[in-house]
Image (spheres, grey):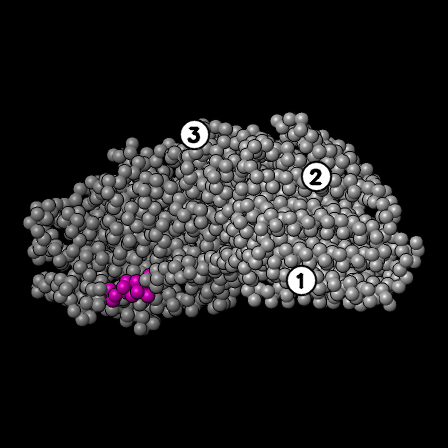
Amino acid sequence: MKEVITNTPPQNWYLVLSTLLFSIGVMGVLLRRNAIIILMCIELMLNSVNLLLVSFSAYAGNTDGQVFVFFIMVVAAAEVAVGLALLVSIYRNLGSTDIDVLSKLKG
Amino acid sequence: MTSDIVFFLLAAVSVFTALMVVFSKSPIYSVMWLIACFFSIAGHYVMLNAQFLAIVHIIVYAGAIMVLMLFTVMLLNLNKESEPHKSIFTKATAVITGGMLFLVLLAAMRSTQLGAYEAPVTTDVGFVQKVGMKLFTDYMLPFEMTSVLFIAAMIGSVVLAKKERNL
Amino acid sequence: MNTLIYTSVLGFFCMVAEILNLRKLIVPIVVLGLAIIFGLNLLDWNLNKSFFNDMLRVDNFSVAFSGLAIFTSLLVLIMSGDYYQKEQGYISDFTAILVFILVGGLMMLSFANLTMLFLGVETLSIALYVMAGSRRFDIRSNEAGFKYFLMGSFASAFLLFGIALIFGTSGSFNIYTIAEYTANSQGNISPLFYTGMVMVIFAMLFKVSAAPFHFWAPDVYEGAPALITAYMSTLVKVVGFAALYKLLTVVFYYTSVKTGLILNFVAIATLIVGNLMALAQDNFKRLLAYSGISHAGYLMLLMMASHELPTGSLLFYGLGYVLSTLAAFAIAIPVFEAEGSENISAFNGLGKKNPILAAALSMAMLGLAGIPPFIGFLGKYYIFTESLQAGFFYTTLIAIICSIIGVYYYFKVIIAMYGKPGNDQKVSVSFTYALVLGLTLALSLYLGIRPGAIINIF
Amino acid sequence: MLSLLLLLIPLTFSIVIWFTKGMVSRAAALVGTIIQLAFTAYCYNVFLEAGNKPFEYIYQMAVKPNLVFHFSMDGISMLMVLLTNLLLPLIVLAGFSRYTDKANVFYSLMLLMQMALNGVFISFDAFGYYIFWELALIPIYFIAFIWGGQDRAAVTLKFFIYTLAGSLLMLFGFIYLYTYSPQNSLDWEVLRANPICSCEQGWIFWMLFAAFAIKIPIVPFHTWQPDTYKTAPTQGTMLLSGIMLKMGTYSLIRWLLPIVPDGFKEWQYVAITLSVIGVVYASVIAIMQRDIKKLLAYSSIAHVGLISAGVFTMSRVGLQGSLVQMFAHGVNVVGLFFCAEIIMNRTGSNQVEGIGGIRKIAPRFAGWFLVIVLASVALPLTNGFVGEFMLLYSVYGYNTWLSVFAGLTIILGAVYMFRMYQKVVLGEPMLENMQFEDLKWNEQLVLGIIGILIFALGVYPEPIFELTEPVLKTLTP
Amino acid sequence: MEQFIQPINLIGPSLLVPLLPLLGFILLTFFGKQLKTFGPWIASLLVLGSFVLSVYIFSSLGNENNLDYDLFTWLRWGDVSLNFGILIDPLSLIMLLVVTGIGFLIHLYSIGYMHHDEGFVRFFAYLNLFIFFMLLLVMGNSYLVMFIGWEGVGLCSYLLIGFWFTNDAYNDAAKKAFIMNRIGDLGFLLGMFLMLFYLGGLDYATVLGSASSMEKGAPILVAITLLMFVGAMGKSAQIPLYTWLPDAMAGPTPVSALIHAATMVTAGIYMIVRSNILYSLAPFTLEIVMWVGVATSLFAAIIGIKQNDIKKVLAYSTVSQLGLMFAALGLGAYTSGMFHVVTHAFFKALLFLGAGSVIHAMGGEQDMRRMGGLWKYIRLTAITFLIGTLAISGIFPFAGFFSKDEILAAAFHHKIVWVLLSVSSMITAFYMFRLFFLTFFTTFRGTEEEKHHLHESPWTMTLPLAVLALFAIGAGFLGMPSVMHMPHWFNGFLAPVVETSKTILGESHHVDHSTEIMLMLVATALAISSIVIAYVFYISKKSIPESDEETKGFAKWVSNKFYIDELYDRVIVKPVMVLSDIFHVVVDKLIIDLFVNASAWMVGFTGRTLRLVQTGNTGFYIFVMVIAMMVLLLIQLVQ
């Protein structure tokens, strides 16, 4: 089972890729008003982190990173659950998922 | 070299789908693009020899989270072009900000010497046994504590989603 | 370690109690349980041991701050019985979540591994998102919950990205190993590490609502149910700062040169934003939110001075802040309920109708404003001493000037109570609120006179 | 231990009074202050016989940072404690002629204030000193705010924040001293023995001076004062002007001069010029004041301006004079405000113009009032003269032209005081149906005691000299 | 100064001298109600007691010995201690006798004069207090104690001028007197500071001792003496601080007699004589003193011509006479000045009391234009008044002749001064006789009602008149001019006091006998011619002064006192008042407070502005957070 992949791209490429994905996620959060899409963008950000961790883990031969990714997935799931619950609750009250509507509290 | 080509292919797919998630008009398309994105990321995992995570990733993200999202989108009937547009100015700011963040991050990571990581040393780090061993020995406590997290999230979701006003 | 496990068990008990139809007993039992856990926690003093393959490390720092966290939760839970009187159906859920928040906090205090920190932060946050939005039919509560959720998860992503970068450079999640890495490779630390460090610090600053990452705090505090606001503004802030402090003193100890300027920048911003923006507030909860931000500013001074290890001052200030804030809430909640408003004007005429309550609130406000002989003053005194000792001359001066401004808005409440006419409807305070009020004020007075017990604990 | 008792007696009474009601509170407050006065007299004897040993008390609050309450006693402290505890019964007694709403809270706060004031004067550690300094502010704020008059919220808030701003700067100065003085201590003796580098004393001087200048107040830091004096209930004004203001001048001698001597020297000329400008400036303003209490407030600024000028001369005569004058001014200004209170209470007017004729109806009151007025214009053989003579002389010793300028106070003082006296007390009654009851027993008592003090100290100030001389010897070359 | 043996046995009596009136004051103040009838008598008797004691001290002390005794330390600091002590030497003895003697007579007079006043007892309390302070002034052994008395008499003057306190004009006059005095006192005070600073003490022994070791004309001595002279200007009503004295006539007439003519106003002269060594050492100051004296003398005399209020005339004559005395002092003739103080005390007190008697008779009327022909109604008063008038005009052998003559003789070497002073005394004679003629001769010009009211005063009033008249006649013989070959007792008695000055100033320009006789004749001739002119005007022509509206030209200026009061009001009082308002409204409220409030407002404004950032929009929040995050990263990067 050893040496399955002998020739992999340099690790920096993964770094750049994850950063790019992360930035796209951030951009999405900033760009969109629909809460559910923002939620997805955040998921995207988390995934970029996952990718980064996995790459670090693989290149360093350190399993810890992959275990951490596992925890991130768990948390992401929980977050999504709660987030969607909140969203549903809001939608019931406001009939909208536009976050710009959520600006009663200010000042 | 093949792996490089595969990497670039996958990377291109990832970035493209990610961009599509952001720029899709309809939420439902966003969801779909995101699922595609997740699959491409799973591909990266496989390339990095993290089979276990690749599987879990598909199951959790594509199978659970995204389905949940899709379900919500449908439930709330958000599948329409309901989103009022942000002004061009805001949009431009958002894009520029995202780009700048990318640049700043790159700048911050410039001249990164990850010398030790030129190539994976051991390649079985991502295998199920390894991850499993780690998870249930070293990471036993976090693993257990996730149960607390989950219960909290579960109760929370239940509480928030209950429809009736009073018991 | 025991503390964490027992607290989790206590949380699960709430669920079980629901099934066993023991709703009436939940709050008393949880309070009792927390009291016992508080005692058990103190037994670990000087234990200095690590558990679960160095996932947790119980040292005096964690014991002390866990004690503070448990104590805070204890006070909040005492009040929860009356607060949720009308929502008996949810009492077990709410109590459980409140306990789980504490569990998250305890993880953040005793972590020895960034995994635990991350899980702790998430447990705490997710539970809080729920609680902030728990008034499901109140749009403001919804908004608060969702705003908090969105921004919180956004910040979490940064935290994770930072952790990933740190892991990538140092090859470990264990904070002591990371510290070793930084110590060993002085001058040769990868820029990735610094980027990760900034991101982690950013995420923690977000949790403690330091400016310019404070935006969520006023909105969420205002929208969330009052009791949750109390909980958030006390426990989360203290725990967040303790965790940040631990990060700064353990993980980033050898890179404090790099963190110094960032923290200085944030500290000044926080002080100014917190104090200036509080001036124009009418809503009491919002006022306390900004007050919380300004206190975060003072605590930021300690973070700046963290290489001098001012742990005692941190604990003391945290305790002082918790006591004063909870005292304020213990009065504010019943007043809000009686007046049906959360504005400062709800306190109008309180000095006439409930002189004792008004006096107590005055004491709390003076404590928050940092006027002797209340505990808040000593806390500030320590902070100024520490930061001057660490050489932050101008920042300390700014902090001092800001605390002058601070007096103004705390006195707004006092002026409302004594200077403005209100209705004659007396506010009745139930036993639990009175108990919390008495406890907090007595303790803050006592510690105002004998701070040695806390300040020189380390 | 004696010093601790000095604090505990008023504190105990303060707590006890909270649980009483109405007339009983008043009586209890009187009893409390009288007991405190008796105890102070005892302390005075002990001090004369045994020095500061019986008063030494050190309570270590925390180790790092080193927080210490160090109570002790020396001549200056004893003088101020005497003044405080002497005036308090008078101030309480002054309240017997009118009804006070929520008297228990009022007198409880007053006794709390007494404790804090005593604490300020016997603290020999800057930390403890600062605590009491601030503690004194809280009761007076509430007294002025809750029982105050027009615009009380805004005025008292301004007062509070203004003074607190000064105090916090002082705190900053103290913390800096603590951090960078070699001993890491705030103990008076230690700070004195190890002054900080004189290059830093300059700005530390200003930090401390800000607090004192605001409290005293020295022009141009005075704008909180006239309005506060006017708004506060008269008993509060008495506390403010009679004792609290002395905290500032006392602190100049106790803390500013010995701790940052070089900074003191460096900025002496500015401080003294400000003080003297304040003397004339406030006197001139007082001439045309229309409100009695504001007039007295400005006159107070003028008087204390001279006191601080005396301190800033750094000469023996200036310090001695300022101490005498602090005591004298405390007594006189309480008397003046009491008279103002009586007038305002009975005529219902607070204006200088448009009353008149009191003399005709209430000669006894007019007589006592005149005595106090005379004392405050520094007529020889009244207590006001002794201090003023020494102070003016000390200013003269510093600079001739300044002393000429400062000397104008004896002219201007006469102008505004006699103007007020004439308009208010003399002439024909101008208010319709003016009912002006002559002095009641308590008023008679208060004014009588003040009168006795005025003449006793005016003729024989020796006890004050005796008390304070040994300390001053150590303070000045 | 050589050391004298301390006559210890006299300390007790000396202390009693001031304490008796003080006792009277205390008794009358606190037990005024109970002592309604006897109070004034007690007060008078206590002053009489003081007088008797003074006589006793006088007789047992003589002019050989001094009593200089420190009672207790009053003020002290460091090495300096200022004592409270008494000094009895020839100079103070003279003053003691004058003060207590005339004081007693005026007490007695007041019993009659003030009988119907409701403040009867209070009046005596004040008088006693005045006597106390005046005695303190003259008995102190240091400038500090003198200053106590100095200010104390000022206070009493204030109290007594404003005795009828319901009248606001009187109150204004009282206030004016006090404040004018205070201006002088500031000079006095500063003079004391200089003494303390440069001469090492305030008691006469130290000051004069260390001064005599200094060279003549030392600037510091000039400064000291000038400042002290400012004090004297205030107290003794010299230009420019004289305006209070005419106004002070608002007080009851006995007060005018005692305080504003006989005793208090001469305190300035006493002070200068007391410090004659200092002044002798400062010739420049002497020059100033002289010119101020001359100017005042002439100026006040001119104003006196056109006054119609009987007391105002006397007041200006007092100012004028005081000027004369200062001129004498300025000429170095200390004893002559002092001599004139004494004689003036007698005849001026007499004149005032006489005027009081007239006013009493007229039922309060003071305007001479409404009097006339009173000679036959109040004969005794008229006769004594005539004696006083002759005395002040300097007609032989009345007291004024001798003292005035001495001064003129001293001035002779200084021709201009001599001429001016002669003119001044001529004018004095003129307006005094104008007063006398207008009041007592021709026909009564008052109302019928007043005419019925006319009556002679009771014995308590006339007795003092008679006694004073005796002195006005006889007191001059205490100082006979040398031409008469009689001992000049007064000069001899005061000789020890001015001994040192004599040596400093050198032998004074002594006029020979023939010149002296010539001078006397000239003076008398001038006086008599004035009287004749007055007679022609007011008896032969029976002209009465026109009413105020008719006065024109220079006369209007004179009768309006050259508008000096108005000038002061314009130049000093009003500007100060305006300044007060400016300080209060502009500087205090607008500038300083604005600064304070503006900083508070700025803080609040910044807060309100920052609030706008908190829009409530989550997207915006995240945006700011990202930006800030980038800033942090960049900070980290750049560092």
Residue position marked by numbered label 1 in the rendering: B20
The mark closer to the camera, 3 or 1, is 1
Using the image as rendered, state which of residue D41 and residue E537 is in the foreground: D41
Toward which corner of the image does residue C72 lie, by quadrant? top right
Element marked by disc 1 = helix
- As measured in the structure, the alpha-carbon distance from the residue carrying label 3 to the one carrying label 1 is 78 Å
Q: Name which residue lies at 32% across and 55% down.
A: E177
Indicate the secondary structure of the residue bearing disc 2.
Answer: helix
Residue C230, percent from left and from top: 60, 41
Residue identifier under label 2: B151
Q: x%, y% of residue D417?
A: 37, 51
Picture layout, residue D157 above or below residue E286: above
Q: Which residues are magenta?
A: E561-573
Q: Residue at x 37, y 69 (%)?
A: E509
- Numbered mark located on residue C342 in the image: none
The residue labelled by disc 3 is: D22
Have a look at marks 2 and 1 and say if they share a chain: yes
Separation (CA) of disc 2 from disc 1? 34 Å
